[in-house]
Amino acid sequence: MSFNRKAFAIVTGCALLLSPLFSTLANARPNAVANSNSTTIARKMGEATPEKMEQRLQKMAKELNLTPAQVDQIRTLRSTTRTNIDGVLSADQKAIIKAALAEKKGHKAAMQAANVTDAQRAQRKQIWKDSKTAMEKILTPEQRAKWTAKMQEHKGNTQRTNVPR
């Protein structure tokens, strides 16, 4: 056997022996980073990060020509709404929903997997309705008309993208 063939055999053998180790390390690294960064975890599960929420608020402020006072009121409203919505579910239900969303199962399937009750659904729906009413009170009639149009446009886009294939 020539030197080149021996060297090739040794390198190939080492690669085969070490490949499980490299594979394990390669797979472990992204998880380690994700576990150390809650923003990354939220992004992977489709949740809005605080940064993303602030970007959306600033975009809304620009589109609707909101005053700084209105921006502060909307920021507070969104935070309160999120806290109230989260308070309806148990810790176990939240964990099940996050896991289902991470698996790209969709919101409806995630809620079913968590056994969200009709009462909880109704409570969450009422919180959203109250939030919408409060938002309408913050906005001027002009701003409200633009916001409503944007909401309808978004709703139409969401319905088209969520159609089962």
Image (tube, grey):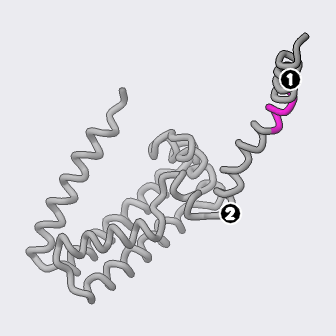
Residue at the disc numbered 1: 7
In this picture, residue 152 sits left or right of residue 11: left
Q: Type of residue at label 1?
A: Ala
Q: Residues within 10 Å of mark 1 (few under 14, many from 20)?
A: few
Secondary structure under tag 1 reads helix
Where is residue 7 drawn, in percent x and y?
86, 23
| Mark number displayed over residue 35 | none
Magenta stretch contains residue 151? no
Q: Is residue 130 visible?
A: no
Where is residue 144 drawn, in percent x and y?
15, 71
| Mark number displayed over residue 36 | 2
| Quarter where residue 32 is shown | bottom right
Q: How many marks?
A: 2
In this picture, residue 47 sits left or right of residue 90: left
Furthest residue in direction front, as rendered: 2
Q: Nearer the viewer, residue 78 or 91?
A: 78
Task: Give the residue displayed 84% in from the left and 15% down from the top.
Answer: 5
Where is residue 142 drawn, in percent x and y?
8, 74
Q: Type of residue at label 2?
A: Ser
Q: Nearer the viewer, residue 48 or 82?
A: 48
Q: Residues within 10 Å of mark 2 (few under 14, many from 20)?
A: few
Q: Is residue 157 above or below residue 60?
A: above
| Quarter where residue 61 is shown | bottom left
What's drawn in magenta, residue-wise? 16-21
Where is residue 74 drawn, in percent x and y?
32, 78
Q: Is residue 161 above or below residue 14?
A: below
Task: Give the residue displayed 51% in from the left and 39% down from the top.
Answer: 105
Magenta stretch contains residue 19? yes
The reply to whether the C-beta atoms of the residues labelled 1 and 2 are less than 8 Å apart is: no
The main secondary structure of the magenta stretch is helix
Secondary structure under tag 2 reads loop
